[in-house]
Amino acid sequence: MLNPREIRENSSFIEEGLNRRGLAVNLNSLKSNSKKLKELELERSNLQAEGNRIGKEVGLKIRAGNKANSEAVVLLRNKGNEIKTQVGLIEEKEKALAKSIKEEILQYPNIPYSDCPDGKDEKDNIQLRTWGTPLIGESYKEHWEIAEELSLLDTERSVRIAKSRFITLLNQGAKLERSLINFMLDMHTSNGYTEVLPPVLVNSASLEGSGQLPKFAEESFRCSEDDLWLTPTAEVPLTSLHRDEIIPFELLPIKYVAYSPCFRREAGSYGKDTRGLIRLHQFNKVELYWFVDPSNSREAFKKITSDAEAVLQALELPYRVLELCTGDLGFSASSTYDLEVWLPGANSYREISSCSICDDFQARRSSIRTKRNKQTQLVHTLNASGLAIGRTMAAILENGQQSDGSVKIPKALVPYFGEALLKP
RNA sequence: GGAGAGGUGGCUGAGUGGUCGAAAGCGAACGACUCGAAAUCGUUUGACGGAGCUCCCGUCCGUGGGUUCGAAUCCCACCCUCUCCGCCA
């Protein structure tokens, strides 16, 4: 959430920031509404002060022996009633105004970081570095072909169970998925992360807190009778793990790693990635999440990204790192690095991890603060996939494929998977 | 799902109409004592907003309404938690 105070006092900075994302926004009415609200608050609190004074006076008079229906007391009571009516009127206005202000502010995404490269869409993202040597050639198969030949999954029967874009893993496919989850969790926990297995259903407040609501309701599956939604990413429950809390400063940074299934409607992506493991309504993900001291969050951002990269390196998967431009940033992020893994069958890089720093955007929405020397301030939050499991499996299949139809399992994963080779 | 109990500050927990933002204890911070520490003693210790920014004003005792000059305290609705029973992996 944008800072309401900053909107009042420095709205042009906010407007410029939103403009850099490609949003032509004019905050004048929001700004004047916000100021108007402050005026109403002041007016009301003055009246309340007067009312409190009268209340005390009545108490004193009665204790001094005046009857409740004596003239002096009745006069005060009438005055008190008058004030109460006025306060009620102001409060009504305040409530309506505050509601419309909040509704508007919740619509606005985070301001891009000053160093975030300007750009319109994904074409303007900047490649920072690559790792490994991409396999390039005509003969590489796409992962769904390999998966089918090795009977790792069943697409058609999955439609019977649920609908299209759900997948059922079988045999070694199921085991590979499981071993990847365990491998990643072990890797991160041995690197200082606290493991979390959060609820997969989350309430509306949690979605609002991390930035999915109110704007992206159509992206999530909802259990309408319970105010519960299927979580689109573990980022949601992890943010809310500390919602409405003041975290002692000594505890920062808090680093969590959570495995969770993720559910997304993928609205508006019909016809895209219809085959295979790339774009599903349900997929597994291991997510990294940090709560940090705002004064060194940019360093933390580099670190969480390298923690995600370490997984790709351990699995010997070539990848590149992109810095997203302002036009391609996610709603809550102020900066994002995307990790894209090389898929030789598709002959392209595909996003496998998104590493974002949200500054205080989620912390303000979720009211997560820290306290040092009597100073409370919002924390900064960061998240990174470490990694998306299904896409990792696709990458392993495509990068490890052998001419005889088998697939080589990355060395680091062998102890988890139990075999060095996937064979028909 | 049925029955009961309850939601108060970092925690425990008192408070049933008038200086109650809230006793007491614990915890924490600072100071004294000490070579140092423990123990002990003293002081301090919630959040948000506003302002003449450590003194002032307002709001906050699950949430939202209501009664009253005045509500943590009374009334109504809702939410949540706990215990027991039922069901169940």
Image (cartoon, rainbow, N blue to C red):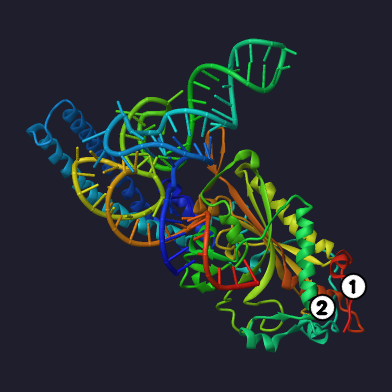
Mark closest to the chain's N terminus, 1 or 2? 2
> Are the residues flagged by discs 1 and 2 in contact, CB closer than 8 Å?
yes
Residue B85's place in the image compared with B83, above or below, is below
Please state which amino acid type lies under the numbered disc 2. Answer: Gln
- The image position of residue A306, as x and y in percent, is 75, 55
Q: Residue at x 18, y 40 (%)?
A: A80
**What residue lies at 20% left-to-right and 28% top-to-bottom?**
A60
In the structure shown, which secondary structural element does the residue marked by tag 1 occupy? loop
Q: Which residue is mark 1?
A: A419
Q: Quadrant of the C terminus of chain A?
A: bottom right
Up-down: is B51 above or below A352?
above
In front here: B50 or A413? A413
Please tell me which residue lies in front, A86 or A304. A86
Disc 2 target residue: A172
Could you tell me residue B15's position as x and y percent?
36, 37
* Nearest the eye: A171 or A209: A171
Res A26 seen here: no
Residue type marked 1: Glu
Using the image, tell me which numbered label, if any, was put on residue A288. Answer: none
- Location of residue A316 by image quarter: bottom right
Instruction: Identify the secondary structure beneath mark 2.
Output: helix
Are tags 1 and 2 found on a single chain? yes
- Chain name for mark 2: A
- The span from disc 1 to disc 2 (Cα, nearest Å) is 10 Å
Residue at 55 percent of width and 78 percent of height: A268
- Callout 1: chain: A
x, y percent for residue A167: 69, 81
